[in-house]
Image: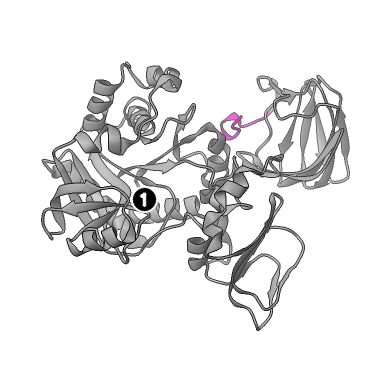
Amino acid sequence: MNIVLLSGGSGKRLWPLSNDTRSKQFIKIFKTETGDYESMVQRVYRQILTVDSSATVTIATSKSQVSAIHNQLGTDVGVSVEPCRRDTFPAIALAAAYLHDVQGVPETESVVVCPVDPYVEQDYFEALNALGRCAANSEANLVLMGIEPTYPSAKYGYIIPEEKEAVSRVSRFKEKPDEETAREYISKGALWNGGVFAFRLSYVLQRAHELIEFRDYQDLFKKYDTLEKISFDYAVVEHEPHIEVMRFGGMWKDMGTWNTLTEAMESPSIGKAILNETCENVHVVNELDVPVLCMGLKDMVVSASPEGILVSDKAQSSYIKPFVDAIDQQIMFAEKSWGSFRVIDIEEESMTIKVTLNAGHRMNYHSHERRDEVWTVIEGEGRTIIDGVERKVKAGDVIRMTAGTPHTIIADTALQVIEVQLGKDISVGDKRKYPSPKNTDIDSHKFQP
C-alpha cells in the first residue's frame, strides 16, 4: 500500500498544547498498551504498519513540521516537504511527483491519500487497503471513502452515491450544509466526505502536468511558491466524471476541537491533576510540572502547557481560534529531530531554555552573531565541538560560547542541558549553519538540520 498522509495546519483550536510549530497531530494524549502516551501521527503510523508492514508511507507537510515528524517517527518515513502553504492540490501533486521521482513508485500503482489525524480503529486502515486495491482495478479515476454519518453534521461535505452498494458511482457532491439540509441529504443515502481518496499514480501525475507546467519533482519543488492555492476537490474532483465511492461504517472521529479530543481520552486527566468527587465530565491535560486542582467543575476542559493555560466550557472551546490568533508570543516548546526544547524564562537581555537531546543525536553545527550562550549539562554524557575542538562533557560541566563561535553538542546518552542565551537582540533568525566538522565519529544520517 502506498499511502500519503496530509499533515497541515497549526491546530490552534487545541491551544495551549498546539502552536505554530507543534500541530495537534504531535500532541501525545493517547495511552498505549505499555502505559506510555503517543500522538495522533504516531498512532496512525503504527496502525498502518500493523495492517501492512510493507506499506510505503509518505507524509506531505510543511518544513516547520519535519523535525517533529522525524522526532516521533524516525527517519524511515517518507516526507514530501512543501516549501510554503499552497493548499491540498499542490501538496498532493508534489507528493505524487515525490513518490514517482524520489521513491521510485511505478505510475501503475495505486495511492491512497488521507488526513494524518483521524481517530479510528484498525478496520479503517483495512478499508484504506481495500480502497487502494479498488483504485488499482476500477475503471474510475478516483475512488473516495464515504463515511456513513452518525448525525446530521454541518462540519462536513457530503457524497451522494447512485446506489446503496458497498462501492457505487458518485451521483453528486454537496458542500457543508446546515443541519436541516444535512438531515435531508442523509435521508437520501448521503455519506460524509472525510477527505480520503485513492487513484492510480499515473492519473494524478497526468492531471498535475495538465494544470501545472513542470518537468519533475525537483522542478515542481523549485516553483512551488508560484502555484495557485487551490484544494484537490476544486482542482480535480469536481471536474472528474469517473468517480466511485466506497462506504465505511466503522468508527471515525475528526479530532479538531477540545470537545472531540476529550471524547477520545481514556482517563479524565493526563499529567499532574486532582479532580474532586463533585467534578462531572471534566478533562485535564497538564504538561507543566505543577499540580492542577479542579473542584466542582462540570463539562469543562482544563489544559496547561508552557504556551499558556486554558479553562473552558467544552461547548465554548470550539470557538477558541480567534482568541488564540490574537496571542503573539515566543514559541515556548518545540520538538526537533534531535530532541526537544522548552523555554523556562525570558528577560530583556536573556533567555533560559531546557534542551533535551535523544541518545545518538546532536544539534547542527552553528553560530550566533548577536548572542553569547552558556550550556550547563544537568544529565547524561556527550561531546561538544566548539570552534572545531571536540571535548567530552557530563552532568555538572559548564560550556561557554561567545558570539560568532561555531558550536554543537552530541548526545552519547540521553542528554539534558540548560542553555542561557545572553544578548540584546535574541532572535531565532540569528543562526548561521556550517557543515559538520571533519574527524568526528558522527553518524550523520541521523542528524536532520
Q: Which residue is mark 1?
A: 53
What secondary structure prevails in the magenta region?
loop
- In the depicted structure, whether residue 301 falls above or below residue 384: below
Left or right: where does residue 61 sit relative to residue 367? left
Q: Residue at x 65, y 19 (%)?
A: 435
Instruction: Looking at the picture, tell me which residue is in the foreground, 176 or 125.
Output: 176
Instruction: Looking at the picture, tell me which residue is in the foreground, 127 or 438.
Output: 127
Q: Position of residue 100 (x, y in %)?
A: 31, 28
- In the depicted structure, whether residue 158 falls above or below residue 80: below
Q: Secondary structure at mark 1?
A: loop
Is 367 colored magenta in this rendering? no
Instruction: Looking at the picture, tell me which residue is in the foreground, 141 or 174.
Output: 174
Crowd around label 1: few <14 · some 14–19 · many ≥20 (10 Å) = few
The amino acid marked with disc number 1 is Ser
Is 448 colored magenta in this rendering? yes
Where the C terminus falls, by quadrant?
Answer: top right
Magenta region: 441-449
Q: Residue at x 24, y 57 (%)?
A: 191
- In the depicted structure, whether residue 291 falls above or below residue 359: below
Q: Position of residue 128 (x, y in %)?
A: 29, 52
Q: Residue at x 21, y 31 (%)?
A: 203
